[in-house]
Amino acid sequence: MCVRERSARVTFEIEAAGETCKLTVIHGEFEDGAASSGHVGAGWPAIISSLKTLLETGEALPLAS
């Protein structure tokens, strides 16, 4: 059985930090007891790491299987 949850909100804040910038990702507004709220924390570090590598080298990290 598939349970449909209300969509959560992802906000990206980009601010100057000297000669670089700081990216803050806020993933919230989950339904109370939403199963997805426990899973998103594991995905963001890999996505942000790949984005950082892409911006620095021009190539993203390979996707994990």
Image (spheres, rainbow, N blue to C red):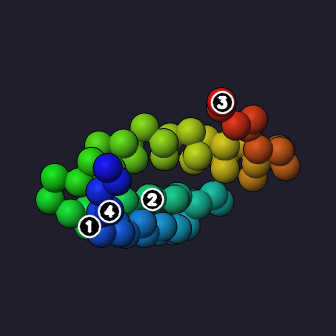
Around disc 4, counting alpha carbons within 10 Å, would you say few (fewer than 14), some (14 to 19), or many (20 or more)?
few
Q: Are marks 1 and 3 in contact (CB under 8 Å)?
A: no
Residue for badge 1 = 29
Circle 2/circle 3 CB separation < 8 Å: no
Would you call the spot at circle 3 few (<14 residues within 10 Å), some (14-19), or many (20 or more)? few
Residue reaching furthest to the front: 1
**In this rendering, which labeled residue sits more in front, label 1 or label 4?**
4
Look at mark 4 in the image and give the residue it sits on. Answer: 4
Spatial CA distance of label 4 from label 3 is 25 Å
Q: Nearer the viewer, residue 19 or 13?
A: 13
| Amino acid type at mark 3 | Ser
Element type at marker 1?
A: loop
Q: Quadrant of the C terminus?
A: top right
Q: Position of residue 31 (x, y in %)?
A: 21, 63
**Foreground tag (2 vs 3):** 3
Residue with the mark numbered 3 = 65
Q: Looking at the image, is mark 2 or mark 4 nearer the viewer?
A: 4
Q: Amino acid at mark 1?
A: Glu
Q: Earlier in the sequence, mark 1 or mark 3?
A: 1
